[in-house]
Image (cartoon, rainbow, N blue to C red):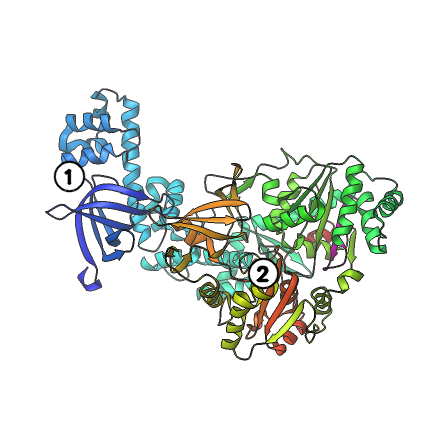
């Protein structure tokens, strides 16, 4: 390895200090060389155990906390060859069913031939006290599994496949894993394994598989459609899919068409015709949207029981509260009482909350059990504050759990439905097709469903355009609140939000309101202005905290005014380093005690605790918090998010946490902040559109500041290109043969 600049160490594993079972990151002590010098070795070394012989290639490094250590980049296992090494290996618990005492008996009986006997002649183990023939067979199979899995990890690891994925391959193919991969490397793209097409293609190329191999073309087609699902679409036009796949794979479109035909014939893809054009779905998305359409139409045919006396109930509340509901508000309240389904939409200041509170009060007075839910923790918390009723995240309400592959599923379903007569879901624009299908599966027959949202905001991060499609179908009672009430007209944030929706420029010249525009000059001046607003000007003028009140929202991650660069600047502005303040760099990302951070993916298993001793699991995409402690010796980061304390190991922190002084508009959905700062300069053209700008503006509760160029604001307002989603739900709802339940 000298030509690669890597150093070589050989020796016996003295002790495995730490191992992350998910990604196999390991810290061990190696007795290296003839002098058996103790060396700390770190790196991804799958399934290594005490007593094994190990050859590692890497470099020396000086760790601030742990001193000199050897970082392994490449490794080679060797089975223990001495009786001492075999005893240490078997005593370590590496082979399930063999402990220290039994290991001693095996070595005493078979000496240096012990591992040979375990692998090739396990029946001889039965002569040892405490080992039956059945247990001897189990020990041998476990030993073979360990070395089979290890061999597989080494083989796939050369292509960048993680140990976690290698374990999924082993679960599917067992001791035939390597031969199955070599026979068809694209089998690694199967849903139960989920390896990316590019890596499978790299493995195939190493074996000089032909470019027009049908397995490759089919895998490429599925990759293209999965890529579109990840971008929010539930289906793809057949002609576009064939064209893109052929170009990606470098094959003739006719061959790509043949692959599509075979995938359709084997039910991997499902086909529908909308408006004379053929569309293709993955099976899961097809089933999902068809179920939603069928169940929603069934709710129209068999609605919840109507509650009589709507006008009387409304009048009673008006008299008691000294208020007068507007016409559209009365219409919404009556529809909720008399219909099985209601879609309630409207922008800020139009009285959605007032209307919803009246609906909840009347339904509860009528004896109905009302459940409230929202897509995110912050949205659920805000819903509770505005209604005075308990609100849960949808995942918590549905009692999320996970299977052996760490895939989420819900315990509330058709066999274990929710216990309610009415379900209210807020921030419905954020709810994707999969989540909404899960909600409907858990909804009791005859239950009332009220969906609340703002259809002018960005659609869900996940696939689908549920709220938009339900409204566009025109089948369900829908009330759109448009009138902005007098008290809300005093807020420029609210009036400007409505101007933006109407395609009009916001009022940006006033200096006495809650909406300000500050020219940014050039990018560097704009960056400095954003930093000054967060670090000194707003805290001094308004008493706002840069951690709890102020949020910078960026259209993009990239560029001088994107989240990546602004987070670096804002960290040094509001949370600079100082003596005694711990920090750590994980996978190139710096984390410092006191940093504001965001959870960037759903983690249903991550445990949390509260000061009152209560505990739970689940931290979700978009949850924000502050790093309260970095434990370098323990390899852990502690984050306080609202009233919960969450502890991440370093590996998980690197995968799931990002700095959150500045976040993208997409990531901010479902959240509101006292003060929002939006850089509007050099916005990428594909992100320069109206409903992204509107979504950003409506995240502000008390103060909004635009920093940048008025021309960019005008371009965003005038561009009415809404986020385009290709979905099938509207078609399934409006055509006669939608799945009926």
Q: Position of residue 92 (x, y in %)?
A: 25, 34
Res. 81 mark: 1
Query: Residue at (33%, 56%) from the top-left corner?
Result: 159
Q: Nearer the viewer, mark 2 or mark 1?
A: 2
Q: Horizontal and vertical percent for residue 377?
A: 59, 48
- Front position in the image: 688 or 363: 363
* Closest to the observer, 485 or 453: 485
Is 451 covered by the magenta stretch?
Answer: no
98 is higher (above) or lower (below) than 473: above
Secondary element under disc 1, as helix, strand or loop, is: loop
Residue at 65% x, 68% y: name it.
690
Which mark, residue 544?
Answer: 2
- Looking at this view, name the residue that lies furthest to the left: 34
Q: Could you tell me if residue 303 is visible in this image?
A: no
- Dot 2, crowdedness within 10 Å: few (<14), some or many (≥20)? some
Q: CA distance from mark 2 to mark 1?
A: 66 Å
Say which label, 2 or 1, has the lower sequence index.
Answer: 1
Q: Is residue 616 left or right of residue 457?
A: left
**Which residues are the magenta region?**
339-351
Front one among 65 and 186: 65
**Residue nearest the viewer, comparing 178 with 359:** 359
Q: Position of residue 291 (x, y in %)?
A: 65, 45
Q: Quadrant of residue 589?
A: bottom left
């Amino acid at each position: 390895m000298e030509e690669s600049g890597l150093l070589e160490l050989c020796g016996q594993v003295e002790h495995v200090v730490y191992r992350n079972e998910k990604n196999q990151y390991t810290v061990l002590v190696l007795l290296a060389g003839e002098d058996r010098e103790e060396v700390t070795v770190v790196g991804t070394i799958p399934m290594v155990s005490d007593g094994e012989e190990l050859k590692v290639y890497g470099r020396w490094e000086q760790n601030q906390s742990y001193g000199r250590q050897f970082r392994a980049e490449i490794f080679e296992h060797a089975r223990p060859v001495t009786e001492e090494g075999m005893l240490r290996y078997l005593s370590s618990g590496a082979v399930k069913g063999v402990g220290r005492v039994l290991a001693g008996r095996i070595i005493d009986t078979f000496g240096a031939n012990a591992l040979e006997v375990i692998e090739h002649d396990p029946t001889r183990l039965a002569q040892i006290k405490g080992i039956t023939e059945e247990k001897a067979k189990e020990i041998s199979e476990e030993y073979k599994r360990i070395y089979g899995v290890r061999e597989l990890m080494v083989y796939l690891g050369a292509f960048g496949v993680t140990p976690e994925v290698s374990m999924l391959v082993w679960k599917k193919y067992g001791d035939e894993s390597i031969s199955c991969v070599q026979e068809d490397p694209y089998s690694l793209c199967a849903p139960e394994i989920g390896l990316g097409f590019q890596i499978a293609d790299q493995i195939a190329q190493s074996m000089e598989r032909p470019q027009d191999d049908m397995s490759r073309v089919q895998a490429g087609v599925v990759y293209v459609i999965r890529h579109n699902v990840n971008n929010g679409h539930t289906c793809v036009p057949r002609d576009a899919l064939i064209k893109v796949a052929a170009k990606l794979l470098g094959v003739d479109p006719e061959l790509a068409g043949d692959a599509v035909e075979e995938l359709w014939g084997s039910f991997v893809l499902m086909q529908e015709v909308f408006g004379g054009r053929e569309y293709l779905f993955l099976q899961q998305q097809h089933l999902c949207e068809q179920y939603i359409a069928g169940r929603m139409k069934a709710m129209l045919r068999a609605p919840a029981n109507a509650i009589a006396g709507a006008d009387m109930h409304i009048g009673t509340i008006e008299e008691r509260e000294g208020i007068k509901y507007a016409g559209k508000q009365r219409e919404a309240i009556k529809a909720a009482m008399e219909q099985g389904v209601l879609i309630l939409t409207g922008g800020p200041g139009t009285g959605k909350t007032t209307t919803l509170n009246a609906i909840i009060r009347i339904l509860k007075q009528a004896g109905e059990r009302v459940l409230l839910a929202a897509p995110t923790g912050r949205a659920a918390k805000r819903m509770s504050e505005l209604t005075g009723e308990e609100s849960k995240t949808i995942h918590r309400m549905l009692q999320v759990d996970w299977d052996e592959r760490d895939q989420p599923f819900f315990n509330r379903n058709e066999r274990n439905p929710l216990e309610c007569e009415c379900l209210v879901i807020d921030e419905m624009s954020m709810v994707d097709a999969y989540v909404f299908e899960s909600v409907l599966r858990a909804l009791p027959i005859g239950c009332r469903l009220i969906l609340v949202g703002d259809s002018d905001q960005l659609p869900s991060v996940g696939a689908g355009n549920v709220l938009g499609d339900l409204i566009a179908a025109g089948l369900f009672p829908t009330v759109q609140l448009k009138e902005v009430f007098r008290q809300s007209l005093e807020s420029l944030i609210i009036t400007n939000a409505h101007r933006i929706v109407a395609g009009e420029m916001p009022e940006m010249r006033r200096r006495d309101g809650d909406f300000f525009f500050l020219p940014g000059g050039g990018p560097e001046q704009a960056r400095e202005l954003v930093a000054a607003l967060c670090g000194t000007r707003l805290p001094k003028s308004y008493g706002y905290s840069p951690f709890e009140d102020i949020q910078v929202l960026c259209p993009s991650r990239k560029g001088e005014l994107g989240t990546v660069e602004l987070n670096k600047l804002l960290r040094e502005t509001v949370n600079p380093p100082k003596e005694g303040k711990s920090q750590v760099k994980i996978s190139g990302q710096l984390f410092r005690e006191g940093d504001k951070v965001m959870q960037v993916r759903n983690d249903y298993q991550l445990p949390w605790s509260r000061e009152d001793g209560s505990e739970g699991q689940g931290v979700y995409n978009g949850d924000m918090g502050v790093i309260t402690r970095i434990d370098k010796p323990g390899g852990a980061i502690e984050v306080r998010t609202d009233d919960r304390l969450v502890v991440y190991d370093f590996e998980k922190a690197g995968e799931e946490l990002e700095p959150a002084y500045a976040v993208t508009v997409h990531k901010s959905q479902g959240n509101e902040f006292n003060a929002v700062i939006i850089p509007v300069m050099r916005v990428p053209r594909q992100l320069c559109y109206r409903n992204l700008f509107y979504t950003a503006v409506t995240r502000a509760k008390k103060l909004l500041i635009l920093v940048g160029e008025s021309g960019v604001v005008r371009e965003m307002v005038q561009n009415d290109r809404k986020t385009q989603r290709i979905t099938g739900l509207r078609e399934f709802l409006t055509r006669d043969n939608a799945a009926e339940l």
